[in-house]
Image (spheres, coloured by chain):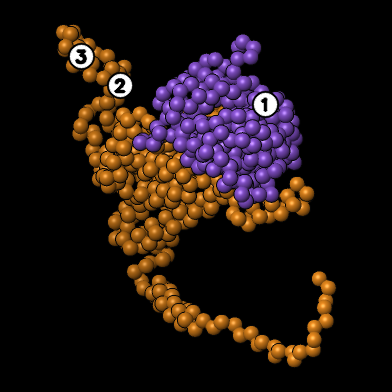
């Protein structure tokens, strides 16, 4: 641009810029500061908190064992839940009406029954059968039909050895999680542009490889954030297995100390702090995992920068 | 395959979408090395025609033969057929989570069973041929539309297809990027690739097509060499269509 001579004109007065004022913010800050001060004051002065007692007891070996159990339960039930959820989601999207109907029935049942009811039910499955056998189904009935004493049982297990509290809790949490995960995975797969599947089919890839290599990896971007939420929710829900009962679990242990020492409230606060700490760690992990799976779907900014680079390199 | 026999034969092909009769008694033969450009108004059945050839859309009635053999219904035979018929889509449909190079090598490695090094060597050749060799490690979203479509062409070529289908390959592109894609397609046509191109690019039809097919209402109304079709269309419908296209 070259400067052109403009006819002499009176210079307009400089504009004095005044920042926008936000009086509402200051009011809110004052109100919140007062509330916060009241809260801290209560924490420090109310004797019922028994801070010293709480800190002395919340790291005792049984409690740490409880933390381990809760984390193990979380990891195992999420692994089973996600794996089973993917299978159920694939069944649900299958053109085969029996498979998709079965998948619908599964999600309907496990989403409709509250987790705590499910857990107590699983804890009492020992009432149904004393032992669980694996082999040909309906072997006795079939044997009766042809008039022989048929026993095609490969092996059988005592209900009390397999359905320990831990197994019952794990089963209840994992099966119910699978139903939620199936819905999340299904939504993720449906969010992938159908053109991606068509392109894979056009290359000659079958249904299975297309789902595994093209659809699922892209669905992950949609699946991962709610799965992180599910994991965090699962960690919290492991406290429900105290009702199965699973006795070596975090919440049960903290409550047990509270009940034994008649210091119920400090131990409940300890439970809050433990769950807060554990879920915070999970949230940090979730942040990094989400960033990894959003690959290929950069923000507008990233895309613009990449295109600017193209232009700079002269393509 | 006997010499001189057509690569693709469509006989009395019919297809319905509900009540809509999208393909009505379509007959079409394409010889090896021929370039056929299909033109016609929106909704005339052009895209559907294209998609029936690799069975992305099944047909209700009639026969489609590739090298004299009817199209298989499903399963492995269908997958093999599709791997022999390349397809380029309007929306590119590059695999969004894979690099440009991986997009091109996926088919050869997973479907053809080539080694990775062999597939990558060939992919780099093809990317150079379509002029995007510098972008091999980028993700599709980092490329311009024209570049993405050229990668999509390279991906289709990597399978060494007997026939290439183009479903409106330039309709989603900015005007200034259309020519870079059409140039690649012209080179392919000149190199003897058999191509069926659904397109609104009359300039391309004029310069690269052996035959122009005009469709309307699910029927093929005319099929003629481009000079003949553009100079003296036989049907009123084609005259009307051309007058609307050429007027601006």
Q: Can residue A216 be seen in this view?
A: no
Relative to B245, is B231 above or below? above
Q: x, y percentage for residue A272? A: 39, 59
Nearer to the camera, B35 or A38: B35
User: Relative to residue A73, is residue A137 drawn left or right?
Assistant: left
Relative to A165, is A161 above or below? above
- Which chain letter goes with mark 1? B
* Residue at 41% from the left image edge and 77% from the top image edge: A35
Q: x, y percentage for residue B30? A: 59, 23
* The color chain A is rendered in: orange
Quadrant of the rendered structure where residue B205 is? top right
Relative to A8, is A306 above or below? above
Callout 1 touching callout 2 (CB < 8 Å): no
Q: x, y percentage for residue B217? A: 46, 36
User: Relative to residue A204, is residue A137 drawn left or right?
Assistant: left
Name the residue carrying label 2.
Answer: A134
Q: Is mark 1 on a helix, strand or loop?
A: loop
Q: x, y percentage for residue B190? A: 72, 29
Q: Which mark is residue A142?
A: 3
Badge 1: few (under 14), some or many (20 or more) residues near its Cα, within 10 Å?
A: many
Name the residue carrying label 1.
Answer: B193
| For discs 2 and 3, the disc positioned in front in the rendered view | 3
* Residue at 40% from the left image edge and 61% from the top image edge: A54
* The color chain B is rendered in: purple
In space, the residues marked 1 and 3 are separated at their CA atoms by: 64 Å
On-image quarter of the N terminus of chain A? bottom right
| For discs 1 and 3, the disc positioned in front in the rendered view | 1
Q: What element carries label 2?
A: strand
Relative to B204, is A145 above or below? above
* Residue at 70% from the left image edge and 43% from the top image edge: B179
Q: Do labels 1 and 2 share a chain?
A: no
């Amino acid at each position: 641009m070259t400067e052109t001579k403009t006819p002499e004109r009176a210079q307009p007065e400089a504009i004095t810029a005044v920042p926008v004022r936000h009086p509402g913010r200051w009011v809110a800050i004052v109100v919140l500061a007062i509330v916060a001060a009241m809260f801290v004051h209560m924490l420090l002065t109310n004797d019922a908190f028994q801070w010293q007692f709480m800190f002395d007891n919340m790291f005792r070996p049984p409690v740490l064992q409880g933390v381990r159990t809760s984390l193990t339960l979380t990891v195992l039930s999420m692994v089973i839940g996600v794996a089973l959820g993917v299978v159920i989601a694939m069944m649900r999207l299958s053109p085969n009406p029996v498979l998709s109907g079965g998948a619908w029935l599964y999600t309907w049942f496990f989403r409709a029954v509250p987790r705590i009811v499910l857990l107590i039910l699983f804890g009492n499955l020992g009432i149904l059968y004393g032992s669980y056998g694996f082999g040909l189904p309906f072997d006795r009935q079939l044997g009766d039909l042809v008039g022989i004493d048929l026993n095609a049982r490969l092996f059988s297990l005592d209900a009390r050895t397999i359905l320990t509290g831990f197994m019952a809790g794990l089963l209840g949490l994992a099966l119910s999680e699978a139903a939620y995960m199936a819905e999340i995975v299904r939504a993720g797969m449906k969010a992938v542009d159908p053109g991606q599947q068509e392109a894979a089919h056009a290359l000659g890839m079958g249904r299975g490889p297309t789902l595994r290599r093209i659809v699922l990896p892209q669905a992950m971007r949609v699946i991962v954030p709610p799965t992180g939420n599910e994991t965090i929710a699962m960690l919290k829900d492991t406290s429900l297995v105290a009702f199965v009962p699973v006795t070596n679990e975090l919440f049960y242990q903290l409550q047990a100390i509270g009940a034994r020492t008649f210091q119920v409230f400090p131990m409940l606060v300890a439970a809050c702090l433990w769950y807060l700490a554990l879920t915070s760690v999970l949230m940090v992990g979730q942040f990094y995992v989400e960033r990894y799976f959003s690959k290929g779907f950069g923000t507008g900014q990233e895309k613009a920068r990449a295109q600017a680079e193209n232009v700079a390199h002269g393509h | 395959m006997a010499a001189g026999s057509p690569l693709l034969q469509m006989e009395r092909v019919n297809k319905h979408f509900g009540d809509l009769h999208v393909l009505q008694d379509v007959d079409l033969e394409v010889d090896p090395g021929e370039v056929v450009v299909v033109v016609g108004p929106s909704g005339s059945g052009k895209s559907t025609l294209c998609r029936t050839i690799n069975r992305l859309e099944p047909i209700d009635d009639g026969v489609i033969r590739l090298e004299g053999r009817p199209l298989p219904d499903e399963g492995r035979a269908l997958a093999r057929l599709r791997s022999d018929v390349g397809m380029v889509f309007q929306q590119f449909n590059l695999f969004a989570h894979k690099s440009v190079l991986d997009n091109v090598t996926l088919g050869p490695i997973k479907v053809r069973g080539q080694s990775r090094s062999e597939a990558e060597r060939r992919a780099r050749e093809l990317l150079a041929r379509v002029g995007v060799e510098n972008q091999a490690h980028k993700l599709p979203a980092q490329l311009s539309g024209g570049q993405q479509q050229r990668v999509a062409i390279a991906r289709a070529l990597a399978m060494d297809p007997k026939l290439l289908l183009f479903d409106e390959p330039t309709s989603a592109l900015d005007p200034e990027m259309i020519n870079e894609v059409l140039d690649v397609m012209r080179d392919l046509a000149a190199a003897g690739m058999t191509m069926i191109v659904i397109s609104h690019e009359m300039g391309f039809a004029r310069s690269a097509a052996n035959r122009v097919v005009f469709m309307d209402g699910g029927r093929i109304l005319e099929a003629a060499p481009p000079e003949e079709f553009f100079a003296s269309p036989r049907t009123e419908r084609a005259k009307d269509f051309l007058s609307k296209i050429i007027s601006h």
